Amino acid sequence: MAASTTAWIESAADDFDVAEAMFDSGRWSYVAFMCHQCLEKLLKAAVYDCAASIPPPTHNLGSLLKLTGLQVPANIRTSVLRVNPHYMTARYPDAAGGRPADAYDRSLAAEVRAATIEVRDWLAEHLKSTG
C-alpha cells in the first residue's frame, strides 16, 4: 500500500476518534462533521489505492465513491449519501438554517455515526484486499 494511501487512512482513523470523543461529550454537530471527514479521507485513500489516481479536491462523498471504481452495494451508497450533507450543515448556520448545534441531537448523530461505521468497515475490506 502506498504511503499516500496509508496517510489518508491514518488521518481518517484520527477523525473517527474525534467523532467518538464528540459523541461521548454530546457535541452532536461535530460528530456529524468528523464522520464526514473520516469518510472523505477513506474514500480518497480508495481513489488512490483502488483506482490508482489522485483524488480531486472535493468534499462530495458521492463523487469520490464513484471515482473509486468499486462495485458498491446499495446500502453502502445510501450510507455515503446520508453522511454527505454534513460537511456543510454541521458547520454553517446558513446551511443548517440556524446554529448548527441546534440542528443535531443524539439520535441524528448516532445515525450518522452508524452510517460512517458501515462505510468505513466496507472500505477497510477493499483497502486490505488491494494493499
Image (cartoon, helix red, strand yellow):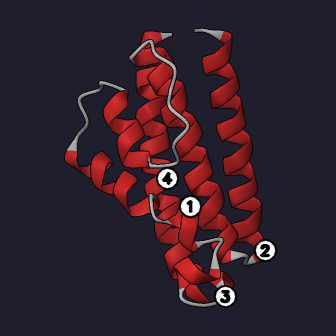
Residue at the disc numbered 1? 87
Question: Which numbered circle lies on residue 25?
Answer: 2
Residue 126 appears in view: yes
Judging by the rendered image, the residue that carries numbered circle 4 is 116
Front tag of 4 and 3 = 3
Label 2's element? Answer: helix
Q: Counting residues from the N terminus, which is met first, the one under dot 1 or under dot 3?
A: 1
**Mark 2 and mark 1 residues within 8 Å of each other at the beta carbon:** no
Callout 2 environment at 10 Å: few (<14), some (14 to 19), or many (20+)?
A: few
Residue sitting at 35 percent across and 57 percent down?
Answer: 81
Left or right of residue 111: residue 3: right
At label 1, the amino acid type is Tyr
Sequence-earlier tag: 2 or 4: 2
SS label for mark 3: loop
Instruction: Give percent across and percent down for residue 40.
Output: 54, 43
Q: Secondary structure at mark 1?
A: helix
Q: Of discs 2 and 3, which sits in the foreground?
A: 3
| Residue 114 left/right relative to 37 | left
